[in-house]
Amino acid sequence: MKRLFIRLCCLFFVFSGPAWSQAQPQPQPQLQLPRVSLSAGMRLIDAQVASTPQQREIGLMFRREMGTNEGMLFVFEQPSGQCFWMKNTLLPLTAAFIADDGTIVNLADMQPQSLDSHCSAKPVRYVLEMHKGWFAQRGIKAGTKLGGSPFTK
């Protein structure tokens, strides 16, 4: 009887295996978003633009690499307090919270795969994520004004 039970269990797993073993599709990074050129002094930034709620929600999640002067610009409909975290984000990043005129309000270094919240010091409409330390290495800090089409009116 015990052997029959074991055989039945094995048959169950063999025939139900494909349903159980079907791997969920691996989440993919967003690589095909529109791009915009920004400037920080003489430095050029190639930024993907995340402007829809879904694009902003995914952001730079699942990216394993990114060019040195590449980042992501999050564009919101209106200025408000913005908070970011790093769930499923594999790269260490720095977020620049940016006012409508392109002035950096504050910067926040963020650790990969962390649920810690990093917020703007005041309402902003833009957030630019770059490699962690990118801004500091170039002497770019709060008060620096960025250039580019989103900030020119």
Image: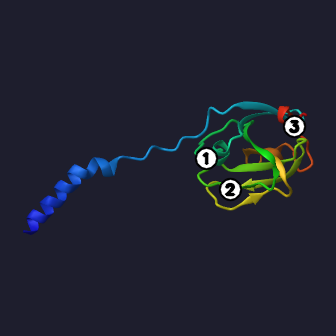
Q: Residue furthest front?
A: 77
Q: Position of residue 62 (x, y in %)?
A: 58, 45
Q: Describe the element under mark 2 as helix, strand or loop.
A: loop
Disc 2 marks which residue? 85
Amino acid identity at mark 1 = Met
- Residue drawn at (61%, 38%) of the image: 30
Q: Position of residue 1 (x, y in %)?
A: 7, 68
Q: Name the N-terminal-most of marks 1 and 3.
A: 1
Q: Is residue 135 left or right of residue 41?
A: left
Name the one closer to the observer, 103 or 52: 52
- Closer mark to the observer between disc 1 and disc 3: 3
Q: Is residue 34 left or right of residue 142?
A: left
Residue 39, above or below 115 = above
Q: CA distance from mark 3 to mark 2?
A: 24 Å
Amino acid identity at mark 2 = Trp
Report how many numbered discs are placed on residues in the image. Answer: 3
Residue 127 visible in the snapshot: no
Q: CA distance from mark 2 to mark 1?
A: 10 Å
Residue 50 visible in the snapshot: yes
Disc 1 marks which residue? 61
Q: Residue furthest bottom?
A: 2
Q: CA distance from mark 1 to mark 3?
A: 25 Å
- Closer mark to the observer between disc 3 and disc 2: 3
Disc 3 marks which residue? 151
Q: Name the N-terminal-most of marks 3 and 2.
A: 2
**Corner quadrant of residue 86:** bottom right
Residue 44, above or below 19 = above
Q: How is the image coloured?
A: rainbow
